[in-house]
Image (tube, rainbow, N blue to C red):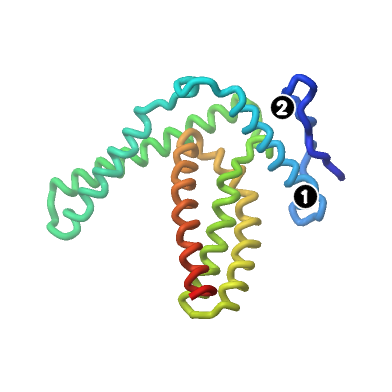
Amino acid sequence: MSLERPVADSSGDYSKLPPLGPPPKFFSLAFHKDFFPAILWRLHLRRKKQREEYSSPFANHVHLEIPIAIVFCITLLVMGLPTLITKHSLAGGAMAVLGSAGLIAMFISSLRSEKIARAEAGGGYSFDYFVAPMFFFFILMGVTAGLSVGFIRNSEWLAIIGSLTGLITGYMVGVFAGIWINYLGWIGAYVVYLVFAAMTAMGILDVILIYGLFFK
């Protein structure tokens, strides 16, 4: 199977992309050589079209009540749990319980709404719903883990071998994570925000580790 990169038509419409068809087997050459690169290219074109259509900072607003509720529950948990453990504070325990209960309730609500929406749509998720940040997150995490092991053992070769191993492992896990994140429902969008923050932190850490291993 050979899949060419789709291009825009004469009007510049990137939404008219040819169907990819059913994916080949994961451990086949066709999947990694043709199918998956075409998926990433489609996502690139989709993002390009969204940027071209974006006109106002208020066009795609975010519902603020959800992140505010998440931050509030995490704050309760972070403030209450230490005082419960160290001082056996009832107030701290109440805060920890409320924060945990709120996070669990939102997580269950997200899973339930996703399950209902999926049932109404009549199926699961295909690669058309692939979330690329999750894929790149696991790749970067694998590389970071390999560099960290090499840095701790003070071995350049171990860092190189570990990074390559982490890269391959992260690639395989990331392909599946990019689809399965959709099953979390709306809360998956906030997981992606955390992923962006984690990728930034890991990128900075990788620069430090590479400098310490190879240039110091």
Q: Quadrant of residue 117?
A: top right
Please state which of the two labelled residues, at mark 1 or mark 2, is closer to the viewer.
Answer: 2
Which dot marks residue 191? Answer: none
On the image, the x and y values in percent for residue 5 come to 79, 38
Q: Amino acid at mark 2?
A: Tyr
Total marks shown come to: 2
Residue 38 left/right relative to 201: right
Depth order, front residue of 91/54: 54
Q: Quadrant of residue 35?
A: top right
Circles 1, 2 touching at the beta carbon (< 8 Å): no
Instruction: Tell me which residue sits at (64%, 32%) in the image.
Output: 48
Dot 2: within a 10 Å radius of its alpha carbon, few (fewer than 14), some, or many (20 or more) residues? some
State the residue lying farthest toward the front: 215
Q: Amino acid at mark 1?
A: Phe
Q: The residue tagged with tag 1: helix, strand or loop?
A: helix
Instruction: Tell me which residue sits at (46%, 76%) in the image.
Output: 152
Instruction: Tell me which residue sits at (49%, 80%) in the image.
Output: 154
Q: CA distance from mark 1 to mark 2?
A: 23 Å
Residue 91 left/right relative to 169: left
On the image, the x and y values in percent for residue 201 come to 44, 55
- Quarter of the image with the N terminus is top right
Instruction: Tell me which residue sits at (59%, 29%) in the image.
Output: 51
On the image, the x and y values in percent for residue 18 come to 79, 30
Which dot marks residue 31? Answer: 1
First along the sequence among labels 1 and 2: 2
Residue 51 left/right relative to 2: left
Q: Quadrant of residue 86?
A: bottom left
Dot 1: within a 10 Å radius of its alpha carbon, few (fewer than 14), some, or many (20 or more) residues? some
Compared to residue 29, the image places residue 102 above or below, namely: above
Q: The residue tagged with tag 2: helix, strand or loop?
A: loop
Query: Can you identify the residue that label 2 sits on?
Result: 14
Compared to residue 135, the image places residue 165 above or below, namely: below
